[in-house]
Amino acid sequence: MIYLTKYLKKYIPIILIAFILLIFQAIINLKLPEYMSKIIDIGIYKHNINYILNIGLVMISITLLWAVASIIISLIAAQIGYKFSMRVRNDLFEKVESFSTHELNEFGISSLITRTTNDIEHVQQFLMMFFRVIVMTPIISFIAISKIMTSSVSLVWIIIVAVVVLVIFISIIFILAVPRFKIMQTLIDKLNLVTRESLSGIRVVRAFNNEKYQEEKFDKANDYMNKNILFINRIMGLLNPGMTLIMSVTTLGLLWFGSRLVGSNDLMVGELVSYAQYAGQVMISFLMLTVIFIFMPRALISAARIKEVLIKEISIKDPKEEKKLDNSKDEIIEFNHVYFKYPNAKKAVLKDINFEIKKGETVAIIGGTGSGKTTLADLIMRFFDVTSGSILLNNVDIRDIKQKTLRSKIGYISQKGVLFKGTIESNIKFGINASKEDIKEVINMSEAYEFINSKKSKEKSEVSQKGTNLSGGQKQRIAIARALLRRPDIYIFDDSFSALDYITDKKLRDTLSNKLSDSTIIIIAQRISTVLNCDKIVVLDKGEIVGIGKHKDLMKTSKVYKEIALSQLSKEELL
């Protein structure tokens, strides 16, 4: 409720206008049965055509006013609902962007997609219904019942019985349907997850001829959701015929008992007709109110899921007071007895990491699969924070530097070479205003010129989502060009040459060595040929440093490094 108030605060004046219009609409709505009663009792029985015409014009005017008020209320409700959903979606997106990998894994991508779309839509729909129903229902019910009581108390019991039966009927539906609403969102998450897995891994699925297996997984998730939706719809489907039956019986009861009062001259025919209309309005009002209370649990569940994301404590935070870096000094990255353990993990992934990287150095980090190479890069970027120890940049702990400041100094190229839907140029620029000359320069530096120039549209060539229309090597070179365009002080190449052939790999490294001689370069690699000429090589094994030095020294002093080297190249090539 606090969060709802926060989002609706700026709409208070327009909400008040809507409430006034709703009250006006309710009062107008209840005037029609009165005029209908007058037409029957005065106009028809006394054959007063002029009276009928005059009252008829008044009723038409009232109906037009009701229609205008209804249109304005609908516009206001739509505006509030859609603006509310827009603001919440925006806040959710910004919040998720601030999440570390830990928070993303905790919620799951499929669940975050559902919360940003389906959950917000449920809250929006409830909000739009709420404005129309919650004000009109008590007003209509109170005035309608008081009208009947003032004229004929003997007929009130019929409406009271009808309302009691209606409440019992709706309560049964409520008890049966609400638990199903609670599990609906979880089932949508599951369906999104299975669909997303199948689509993102379609090549692997086809390569292993496992389409049938994925279809069975989808069918299972879809079947659970289908059964749940069918059950809810069948239960909710009872509302309309049940309400129609109760309303019909109520009208029949009013006419049956009311006709006796008419026969004994205790009630006019017009009054009886108006009572039937009042009864219908009371029943419809209760129905609408009940529908609100049936949809409310689903909206509340969705609101709670949205709130979970909005109030989630972020593990990677900016400092309250940022320590300024001395830009006059050369950048030195120092790992000071760093230990790191993933959240909820029992063992540390990195243990007592202790070394430094000076400006202008090209440092390679090498080791077997699972040795902690990529984790080391993640810690420099603050995708995770160290468990103990510290990482220093110019003698300042990176936790005392704002993430934006830290990452503006680093050009990061990930293993996968992630690209976005657009063009080659838009992927290289990625939010930076750059000239064509700058773009061409980084394309040449990244050895991407040849394949880009071979395309018909060159830099304007289309790139599909995740770059699926490009090869792995092409994606890596575009990702490298994107990092080079930013001109950062530090470059981290996280196994970014793995998809390149050996000749392109060699050319690219030579170009980077010449053009980026003043920059600090960190290369995470598994290829020995990629790291042979680095100024320093850090060898990791099971999260620990087992060797630091140049290639020739490590061949003599590090058993792990020597094993890796000999498994890839011959002794002659290693000399």
Image (spheres, rainbow, N blue to C red):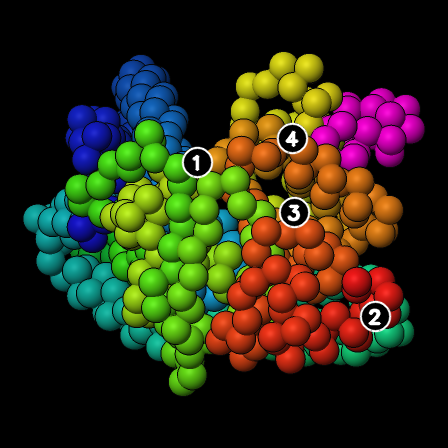
Q: Which of the two labelled residues, at mark 1 and mark 4, occupies the earlier sequence position?
A: 1
Where is residue 495 drawn, in percent x and y? 66, 56
Residue highlighted by disc 3 = 418
Dot 2 surroundings within 10 Å: few (below 14), some, or many (20 or more)?
few
* Start-end of magenta stretch: 443-466
Residue highlighted by disc 2 = 571
- Left or right: residue 44 compared with residue 357: left
Secondary structure under tag 4 reads helix
Residue highlighted by disc 4 = 515
Q: CA distance from mark 4 to mark 2?
A: 31 Å
Q: Which of the two labelled residues, at mark 1 and mark 3, occupies the earlier sequence position?
A: 1
Where is residue 63 drawn, in percent x and y? 35, 26
Dot 4 surroundings within 10 Å: few (below 14), some, or many (20 or more)?
few
Dot 3 surroundings within 10 Å: few (below 14), some, or many (20 or more)?
some
Q: CA distance from mark 1 to mark 4?
A: 20 Å
The total number of labels drawn is 4
Q: CA distance from mark 1 to mark 3?
A: 19 Å
Q: CA distance from mark 3 to mark 4?
A: 24 Å
Residue highlighted by disc 1 = 408
**Amino acid type of disc 1?**
Ser
Q: Which of the two labelled residues, at mark 3 and mark 2, occupies the earlier sequence position?
A: 3
